[in-house]
Image (tube, rainbow, N blue to C red):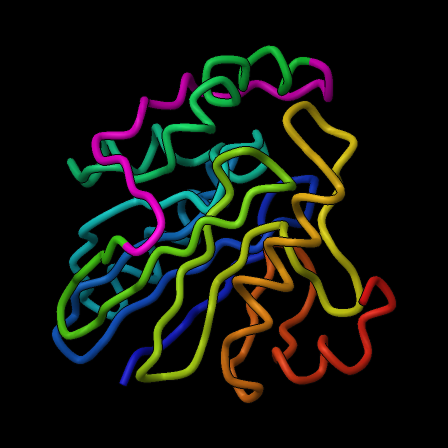
Amino acid sequence: MTTIKTFVFNPFQENTFLIYDKTKECVVIDAGCSDDNEYSTIDGFIKEKDLILKYVINTHCHVDHIMGNAYLVDKYRVSSIAHKEDFPLIERSRDMAMVFGLNVQEPPMPDYLVNEGDEIKFGNTLLEVIHVPGHSPGSIALYNEQDKFVIVGDVLFHGGIGRTDLPGGDYDTIISSIREKLFTLKGDVVVYPGHGGSTTIEFEKNNNPFF
């Protein structure tokens, strides 16, 4: 049984997820922590629960989702994971941060690259990688079949979809990704998006105005 802890970080109110199981091994997905207070918040939780951080994973590499990558990778000496199609977003992240008046530590390039069908394992937990481009070229969802949840980044929201007007975004592609990759999951799978509250596959299939 996995436990999902959600932190809401940075001025973009981005969801950072920390997932762990009874082995105490954990991963951080979309490390949005951006200042000393937010670093202390996630560090404190890891210490309180006596967790062992294994990986820092990105569903995609827009600046609000990678602000804490450098901090966590350096502090915990762990590897980072992302899709190679989002490399250009990492390379431009500091410039993008400056546009919003933010100062971001230079994020490390991913140590491991993943694609459709790959598996990320830690403790007793397995996350299946689903490539869902459209919000960004390298957007991925992380699906846990056993506990029926999927971390989707900014592809699908409660009653909405991700922006497609940013560099690398494409409306037709994101619609296809959701229809063909996410909506084929079982209806009771819980969806955890990169902003806002959780939802389910069934609810979005029946109520999302984009479908």
As drawn, the residue found furthest toward the right would be 209
Image x and y of residue 133, in percent: 56, 42
- Looking at the picture, tell me which residue is in the foreground, 41 or 179: 179
Above or below — where is 89 with respect to 17?
above
> What's the magenta region?
99-117
| Residue 210 is inside the magenta segment | no
- Looking at the picture, tell me which residue is in the foreground, 110 or 197: 110
Q: Is residue 187 left or right of residue 128?
A: right
Above or below — where is 2 with respect to 118?
below
Residue 48 occupies which quadrant of the picture? bottom left
Please identify the dominant SS of the magenta region.
loop
Image x and y of residue 57, in percent: 35, 46
* Residue at position x 62%, y 80% in the image: 200
| Residue 109 is inside the magenta segment | yes
* Residue at position x 68%, y 33% in the image: 169
Image x and y of residue 139, in percent: 51, 43
Image x and y of residue 140, in percent: 46, 49
As drawn, the residue found furthest toward the bottom would be 188
Above or below — where is 117 with respect to 38?
below
Residue 112 occupies which quadrant of the picture? top left
* Quadrant showing the C terminus: bottom right
* Residue at position x 16%, y 58% in the image: 52
* Residue at position x 54%, y 13% in the image: 92
* Quadrant showing the N terminus: bottom left
Q: Is residue 190 left or right of residue 143?
A: right
